Image (cartoon, rainbow, N blue to C red):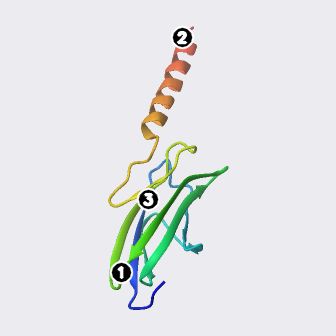
Amino acid sequence: MSGGAPGELRLHVQGTMLFSFVTPTVMLNHEFLPVKYGENVFPVLPGSHQLHIHTDWIWTYGKVRRPVEIRTGESVELWYAAPALTFLPGRLGVGKQRHAGLVGLVVFLVLVVALMVWLMTL
């Protein structure tokens, strides 16, 4: 890390009714950052940083790592979305992210409901 006027990391943690019951763990250079759903702003010294995010529920899932370069006075804005299915990685990028596996989860739930309805009609 180099010295100088701080920059900032703006991390948007996306949530939905399905995913907001577990807050992700965020680490910058192996230091934990306190986060909430929505926008989180952290002052950061200029330089190269390593951002790591994951979510813990029954096991650790939604892992994503990304190098982040912050220049003096610069604001870097990133968005994180945990996956809908816990065996998939999370998504981190510039701009709003889609929850990985959301379509697969919806299809699975529709099939389960359809199977239950079918079994009830037998």
- The kind of secondary structure element at disc 1 is loop
Q: Which residue is mark 3?
A: 80
Please state the horizontal and vertical placement of residue 19, each as a whole percent of the image. 50, 51
Q: Which residue is mark 1?
A: 71
Does any portion of residue 23 appear in the rendered image? no
Q: Which mark is residue 52?
A: none
Mark 2: give few (<14), some (14-19) or many (20+) Cα within 10 Å: few
For the view shown, which residue lies furthest in the right direction?
58
Residue 122, image quadrant: top right
- The kind of secondary structure element at disc 2 is loop
Looking at the image, which is closer to me, 85 or 37? 85
Label 3 is placed on what type of residue?
Answer: Tyr
Above or below, comparing residue 20 to residue 9 in the picture: above
The mark nearer the N terminus, 2 or 3, is 3
Residue at horizontal 46 percent and vertical 34 percent from the top: 104
Please state the horizontal and vertical placement of residue 23, each as a whole percent of the image. 55, 60
The CA span between labels 1 and 2 is 64 Å
Residue at horizontal 49 percent and vertical 24 percent from the top: 111
Looking at the image, which is closer to me, 107 or 64? 64
Q: Which mark is residue 121?
A: 2
